[in-house]
Amino acid sequence: MAMIIREATKDDCVALAVLNGEVQKLHADAYPDVFKWPTDPLELSTYFTEAILNPQHRIFIGELDGEPIGYIQCEAIQRGSNALCLAQAFIYVHHIVVKSAHRSQGYGKQLMRVVFDFAKANGNRAVRLDYWSFNREATEFFARLGFRAYREFAWVRPSDRG
């Protein structure tokens, strides 16, 4: 079945919040001291509304027979040069979500293709993203799409050190 992908509007905020819930819970279960769960519906609606209205952001929603099954949120980022780094322009993927019942059917790849097209339309910018290392499904998905680590983040809590 063909997924229809379109740019999200303010009318999609409830659907985006519902779609986000599955992945948000996954993250909150792994890191309850970092991620909110349950999320506040008004706060989440405000978050999505602000992203939709931001000209640097794009949210694309994927539907099957009119039912939202996934979305991807990205942002065009431009950084000037400084004493240490050259100027950079890239597309940053903030979120990608596909309902678990629809995973491994190519829908995530279709959503990423929209972002790759957006990057080309914005001067063939690199596409960057990050994901939590516990999420093996995300790690494998992005690797299949050709993403390679170029930077790593690490952390320790003082309480973890004894």
Image: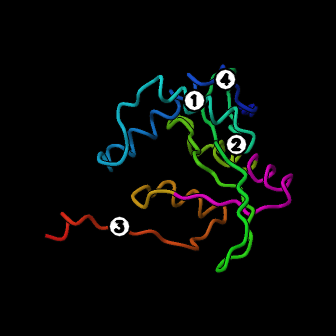
Residue at image location 37% in from the left, 44% down from the top: 35
* Tags 1 and 4 touching, CB below 8 Å: no
Tag 2 near tag 3, CB within 8 Å: no
Q: Are marks 1 and 2 in contact (CB under 8 Å)?
A: no
Marks 3/4 in contact by CB < 8 Å: the verdict is: no
Residue 72, numbered label: none
Residue annotated with mark 2: 57
- Mark 3 vs 4, N-terminal side: 4
State which tag comes first along the sequence, 1 or 2.
1
**Numbered disc in front, either 1 or 3:** 3
Instruction: Check disc 4 and report its element: helix, strand or loop.
Output: helix
- Please name the residue that numbered disc 3 is placed on: 155
Q: Residues within 10 Å of mark 4 (few under 14, many from 20)?
A: some
Disc 1 crowd, CA 10 A, few/some/many (<14, 14-19, 20+): many
Secondary structure under tag 2 reads strand
**Amino acid at pointer 1:** Leu
Residue corresponding to mark 1? 16
Q: Marks 1/2: CA distance?
A: 15 Å
Query: Where does label 4 land, which residue?
Result: 10
Residue neighbourhood size for the residue with mark 3, other residues' Cα within 10 Å, grouped as few (<14), some (14–19), many (≥20): few
**Residue at figure coordinates x 35%, y 31% from the top left:** 38
The image quadrant of residue 148 is: bottom right
Magenta stretch bounds: 114-130
Q: What distance separates the C-alpha of mark 2 from that of mark 4?
A: 13 Å
